[in-house]
Image (tube, rainbow, N blue to C red):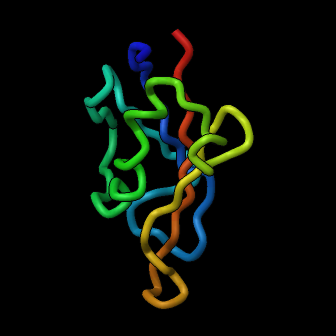
Amino acid sequence: MSEPKDLKIKVKEIAGSCPVYNEGTSFSIVEGHKLKSEQTLCTHSLASILPYYVTLSRGTPPSELGLGRGEEAYVQCLDPCEYTGGGTVVFEISREQA
């Protein structure tokens, strides 16, 4: 298995109104397991990222996971904004090149 690369997670788009994120907000997972951010994160959003971060950081193509067609993977948070009045956030996950 390859060494993990850092992941950049960027807010690609928001449906509804998210009280935590704005489009373009980003944070990282570094050294395979360390969450790094300059700002507040929503713990609910991490639930959509956690199942995939290890395999993506080790180089599995997003297409093999059904998460994208190119180099980036896409997941969304669990908030069904139409029913909660909140915001559903789509995250773009990319593997940092060393």
Residue 58 falls in image quadrant: top left
The relative height of residue 29 versus residue 76 in the rendered view (above or below) is above
Above or below — where is 6 with respect to 16?
A: above
- Which quadrant, please, contains the N terminus? top left
Picture quadrant where residue 34 is located: top left
Q: Which x, y percent locates residue 10? A: 53, 43
Q: Does 45 sit above or below residue 56?
A: below
Image coordinates for residue 88, horizontal then vertical, percent: 52, 70
- Residue at the spot x=43%, y=87% of the render? 84
Which residue is at the far top?
98
Q: Nearer the viewer, residue 40 or 28?
A: 28
Task: Name which residue lies at 29% across and 35% down.
Answer: 35
Left or right of 35 in this view: 79 = right
Number of numbered labels in the structure image: 0
Which residue is situated farthest in the bottom direction here? 83
- x and y percent of residue 78 in the render? 43, 70
Q: Nearer the viewer, residue 52 or 17?
A: 52
Q: Position of residue 95 (x, y in %)?
A: 53, 26
Query: Residue at the location (40% across, 68% down)?
Result: 19
> Where on the picture, by quarter, is residue 86?
bottom left
Pick out the residue farthest to the right: 69
Q: Residue at x 54, y 87 (%)?
A: 82
